[in-house]
Image (cartoon, helix red, strand yellow):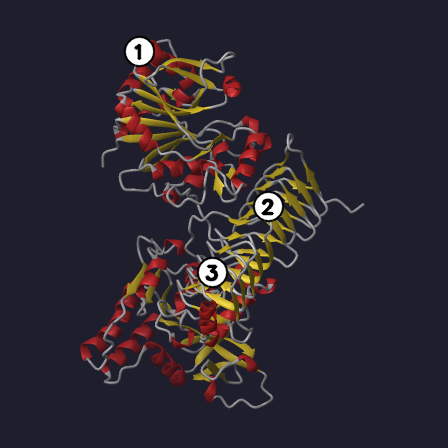
């Protein structure tokens, strides 16, 4: 089986801006939308795009992520001669191969990529919520005879200074790249999705590490080098729902957007399904006292309280008299009786005791960490 | 990979005529249950939980439904490098007066049993819904004197119907025969009956002998009959099961068993016990409940979309209940749709049934209305027809 394009998912970042939620787990394995984990979107996009050979580069707290990804069978990526490989830092005769940055992580895993001898390498991050056909992007890459294509998303001009911005000519060729410019000249934000011709990328990385110029980061080092060497580098515009869920606020927002009946992500579309590791759990049970409106509920859950405008993941228990509003509750959470949860994210395996109160606001989302036990309050 | 101590045989050729039209295109074993299961999930989950590595499935006439559900057996951890699920096809002509065909019937079993390398074999049906610990039954068998162990549950006499299989127990608790309830002569003082759960456990070598001996005779006897005769000839250890049990052999019992899951104690003991019930899972989206939805006392699968009212009902995946629609005391199977303004009560809607707007489908607790697979009901005259069916 010839591997035309190999996918590399950068899933090693710490995700510090997610605070407590990524204390013990990597950002890509954070639960999302009731029955998914963030990386499911990228893995499903790969599977739906026909990219069946995928390296997942992990580094920070990889245990839960590895257990989730396994051999990729849940996403249909376990074909003979293809499949998912978890790539972790390792020690070799040349020293330890920890990853210093996005491009460095690719450099350290050159042997893995070479073992498939692909023509193209698709570099992705594992922490975005979106549906994208990478095959169409590859067609654009080939049509432009590019050696690097960068997926970009038109953003509002006033937002542009928060992103890496690509300035392009009339043919979409990238002529300049500016990281978080104060006065942006365009509104095309890099999505951190790249298609490289493997041979030149390998040459650049090898040469730079053989000499003094280190290429650690795609945005800071590789793209500028490509532009400086006049490599044919093009932008590929993506139109659709795309969300970076790097902060508590954006993770909460993305979950709330996911709840909206006309959400642009269109999760129920069967032509572009999002797959996940599924566990056989009993059906959900809503008791006589349950009141459920504007909500998503997942299997194994038991609800005796009131749920409004919220997402309950697998195996969540909500006791009688409790109210969950504008919140996202992760798997295996137990919420006792007469609890109030409002504008909050409740981490996996957490326990909120009877009469507890977890109350945030729209701009300051309350968070209960993984496995945290939040004290039961005696009724006043 | 180590071979298991036990092998299992499930015969899916159970009598389906009392469950028509639900069984028109499926055996009892693939009847949907409790929002996400098929009945065969219960024996298969017991099998995998007991570390059984070889399972022989004897296919019914409607094989496709079984194939579709089982696939490689991966959902029950039965896609193994050695052993796994073995499917034996349905013999269409069923002309067992033909010696060669008769021999093949027995050989299918004996070949499977010999290759399993197992010491004991469990023979199960798929019409009993229960959460079974086969290791406990094996331990009980080893401690007993008889060659065969049969599993039963004591049920109230009033719940037994004449065709139900039961055990006759001696005072020492030994089963002396397997007979239908109509043949029993229990006195009035007896309030419970040992209902046979269609589970036998016996040494594999004895089962092979039984089948080989039957192959030598001119009369054709199927395995269930052979085992009943063996109990009559040599008695059986009787293992008493005390958990939740439903015996699915009529529409009414099927309906009641699903409704049983709306009682928390039943739901917990059957589905949340130490033996997990495994089933094929689909990558379905979570169920969505809209702004004005009201759901009270419901068991639901994933991918449902509820805008209306659902109470005291079992709802499978991808069901849509539109705004202003009401569903009460009903079973809605996968993909059924209830349009605006319609009311459904005491009904069983098979997969893909669509009920048009402003209709009333009303059965009674003792006579639920059954609407067959993929039927669309859009006119009041069709509703009339259903009520009188």
Q: Chain of mark 3?
A: B
Residue A278 in the figure: left or right of residue B68: right
Tell me the distance, in whole angstroms, between the alpha carbons under discs 1 and 3: 64 Å
Residue drawn at x 34%, y 9% as measured from the top left:
A228
Does A363 sit above or below residue B356? above
Q: Quadrant of residue A360?
A: top right
Q: Which residue is mark 2?
A: A333
The reply to whether discs 3 and 2 touch (Cβ–Cβ < 8 Å) is: no
* Residue A112 seen by the camera: no
The x and y percentages for residue A141 are: 30, 24
Q: Which residue is mark 3?
A: B356
- Label 2: element kind: loop
Residue drawn at x 31%, y 10% as measured from the top left:
A229
CA neighbours of label 3 inside 10 A, class few (<14), some (14 to 19), many (20+): some
Q: Chain of mark 1?
A: A
CA neighbours of label 2 inside 10 A, class few (<14), some (14 to 19), many (20+): many
- Label 1: element kind: loop
Residue drawn at x 44%, y 58% as measured from the top left:
B334
Discs 1 and 2 lie in a common subunit: yes
Answer with mark 1 or mark 2, whichever residue precedes in sequence.
Answer: 1
The x and y percentages for residue B105 are: 25, 74
Q: Which residue is mark 1?
A: A230
Name the mark on residue A281. Answer: none
The x and y percentages for residue B367 are: 52, 75
The reply to whether discs 1 and 3 touch (Cβ–Cβ < 8 Å) is: no
């Amino acid at each position: 089986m010839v591997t035309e394009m190999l996918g590399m998912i950068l899933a090693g970042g710490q995700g510090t801006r997610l605070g407590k939620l990524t204390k013990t787990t990597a950002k890509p394995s954070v639960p999302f939308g009731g029955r998914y984990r963030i990386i499911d979107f990228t893995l499903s996009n790969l599977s739906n795009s026909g990219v069946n050979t995928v390296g997942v580069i992990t580094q920070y707290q990889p245990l839960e992520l590895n257990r989730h990804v396994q051999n990729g069978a849940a996403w249909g990526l376990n074909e003979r001669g293809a499949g998912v490989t978890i790539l972790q830092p390792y020690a070799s005769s040349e020293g330890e191969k920890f990853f210093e940055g996005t491009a460095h992580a690719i450099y350290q895993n050159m042997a893995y990529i070479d073992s498939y001898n692909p023509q193209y390498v698709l570099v992705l991050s594992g922490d975005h919520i979106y549906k994208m056909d990478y095959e169409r992007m590859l067609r654009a890459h080939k049509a432009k005879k590019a050696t690097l294509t960068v997926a970009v998303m038109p953003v509002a001009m006033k937002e542009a200074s928060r992103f890496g911005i690509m300035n392009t000519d009339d043919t979409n060729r990238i002529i300049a790249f500016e990281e978080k410019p104060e006065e942006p000249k365009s509104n095309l934000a890099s999505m951190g999705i790249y298609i490289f011709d493997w041979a030149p990328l390998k040459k650049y990385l090898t040469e730079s590490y053989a000499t003094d110029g280190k290429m650690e980061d795609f945005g800071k080092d590789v793209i500028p080098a490509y532009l400086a060497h006049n490599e044919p580098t093009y932008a590929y515009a993506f139109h659709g729902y795309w969300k970076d869920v790097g902060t508590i606020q954006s993770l909460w927002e993305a979950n709330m957007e996911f709840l909206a009946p006309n959400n642009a992500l269109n999760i129920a579309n069967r032509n572009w399904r999002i797959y996940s590791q599924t566990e056989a759990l009993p059906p959900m049970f809503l008791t006589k006292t349950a009141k459920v409106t504007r909500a998503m509920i997942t299997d194994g859950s038991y609800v005796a309280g009131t749920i409004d405008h919220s997402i309950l993941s697998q195996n969540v228990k909500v006791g009688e008299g409790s109210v969950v509003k504008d919140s996202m509750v992760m798997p295996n959470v137990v919420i006792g009786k007469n609890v109030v949860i409002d504008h909050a994210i409740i981490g996996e395996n957490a326990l909120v005791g009877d009469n507890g109160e977890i109350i945030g606001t729209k701009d300051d989302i309350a968070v209960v960490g993984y496995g945290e036990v939040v004290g039961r309050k005696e009724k006043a | 990979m180590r071979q298991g101590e036990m092998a299992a045989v499930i015969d899916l050729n159970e009598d389906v005529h009392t469950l028509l039209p639900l069984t028109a295109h499926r055996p009892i074993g693939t009847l949907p249950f409790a929002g996400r299961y098929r009945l065969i999930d219960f024996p298969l989950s017991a099998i995998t939980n007991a570390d059984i590595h070889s399972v022989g499935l004897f296919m019914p006439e409607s094989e496709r439904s079984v194939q579709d559900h089982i696939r490689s057996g991966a959902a029950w951890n039965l896609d193994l490098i050695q052993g796994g699920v073995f499917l034996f096809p349905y013999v269409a002509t069923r002309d067992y007066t033909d010696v060669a065909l008769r021999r093949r019937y027995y050989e299918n079993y004996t070949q499977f049993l010999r290759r399993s390398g197992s010491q004991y074999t469990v023979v199960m049906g798929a019409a009993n819904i229960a959460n079974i610990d086969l290791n406990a039954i094996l331990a009980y068998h080893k401690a007993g004197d008889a060659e065969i162990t049969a599993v039963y549950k004591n049920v109230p006499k009033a719940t037994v119907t004449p065709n139900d299989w039961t055990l006759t127990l001696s005072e020492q608790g030994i089963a002396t025969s397997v007979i239908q309830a109509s043949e029993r002569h229990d006195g009035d003082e007896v309030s419970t009956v040992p209902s046979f759960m269609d589970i036998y456990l016996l040494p594999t070598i004895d089962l092979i002998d039984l089948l080989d001996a039957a192959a030598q005779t001119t009369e054709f006897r199927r395995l269930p009959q052979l085992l009943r005769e063996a109990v009559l000839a040599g008695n059986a250890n009787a293992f008493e099961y005390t958990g939740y049990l439903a015996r699915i052999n009529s529409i009414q019992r099927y309906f009641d068993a699903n409704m049983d899951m709306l009682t928390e104690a039943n739901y917990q003991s059957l589905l949340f016990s130490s033996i997990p019930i495994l089933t094929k899972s689909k990558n379905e989206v979570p169920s969505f409940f809209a702004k004005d939805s009201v759901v009270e006392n419901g068991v639901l699968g994933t991918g449902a979309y509820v805008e209306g009212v659902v109470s005291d009902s079992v709802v499978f995946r991808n069901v849509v209940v539109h705004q202003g629609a009401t569903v009460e005391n009903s079973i809605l199977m996968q993909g059924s749709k209830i349009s605006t303004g319609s009311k459904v009560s005491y009904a069983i809607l098979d997969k893909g049934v669509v009920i048009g707007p402003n209709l009333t489908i009303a059965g009674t607790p003792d006579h639920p209305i059954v609407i067959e697979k993929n039927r669309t009901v859009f006119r009041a005259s069709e509703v009339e027809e259903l009520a009188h069916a």
